Amino acid sequence: MAERFTKSMARNMYMGGSLFFILIFIGLTLDTVRQLPERDNRENLTESVAHGKKLWEDNNCVGCHSLMGEGAYFAPELGNVFYRRGGEESFKVFFKSWMNAQPLGIEGRRAMPQFNLNDEDLEALADFLEYAAKINTNDWPPNIEG
Ligand code: HEC
């Protein structure tokens, strides 16, 4: 048995430890990539959803809102707004009238601008938010209010 801790022992621990965790990292990465196709809701990725995502970006909704935690924290999280505001039954109706009613002009309340989008654009944005809500994110955001 070695009497003292040698340089080569330290090097082996460093190399072995690094290799061990690199392998775990690669394994977890492959596992994630394998699971994505079942979780990313790609079967509902329509033209309209893609158009909605473009509008989401062009209008910088994320400058005030977050989507699944990503974005700004000035306005409500929208990752589950589809479920919060009516779901299959009435989300579209809610969403269109919400967008058309802005700004609400209530004193003391944070305001959202008017974007003057047409009906087709609003439809696409609603489809995009519905698509996002149905991605399997392990229940993130954690509650219905985001
Ligand atoms: C300048 C900041 C700002 C931008 C940009 C913005 N919003 Fe908002 N939004 C708000 C605020 C503030 C509220 C909450 C207003 C309130 O409760 O009266 C809100 C609320 C909402 C709601 C309702 C949320 C709920 O829980 O009922 C929806 C839906 C929404 N925004 C969608 C959008 C979309 C889509 C865009 C991009 C086209 C967008 N917002 C861009 C500030 C913004």
Image (tube, rainbow, N blue to C red):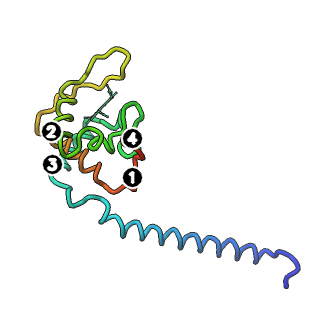
Q: According to the image, label 2 marks what residue? A: 121
Mark sitting earlier along the chain (1/4): 1
Amino acid on which disc 2 is placed: Asp
- Residue in the picture at 34% in, 64% down: 36
Relative height, residue 71 to residue 44 (above, below): above
Relative height, residue 4 to residue 65 (above, below): below
Q: According to the image, label 4 marks what residue? A: 146
- CA–CA distance in space, label 4 to label 2: 24 Å
Toward the right, the furthest residue is 3
Q: Which residue is at the front of the view, 93 or 135?
A: 93
- Residue in the picture at 32% in, 44% down: 80
Task: Give the numbered dot on residue 48.
Answer: 3
Specify whether tag 4 is near ligand 1 (CB below 8 Å).
Answer: yes
Q: Secondary structure at mark 2?
A: helix
Quarter that holds the N terminus: bottom right
Amino acid on which disc 3 is placed: Ser
Q: Which residue is at the front of the view, 87 or 46?
A: 87
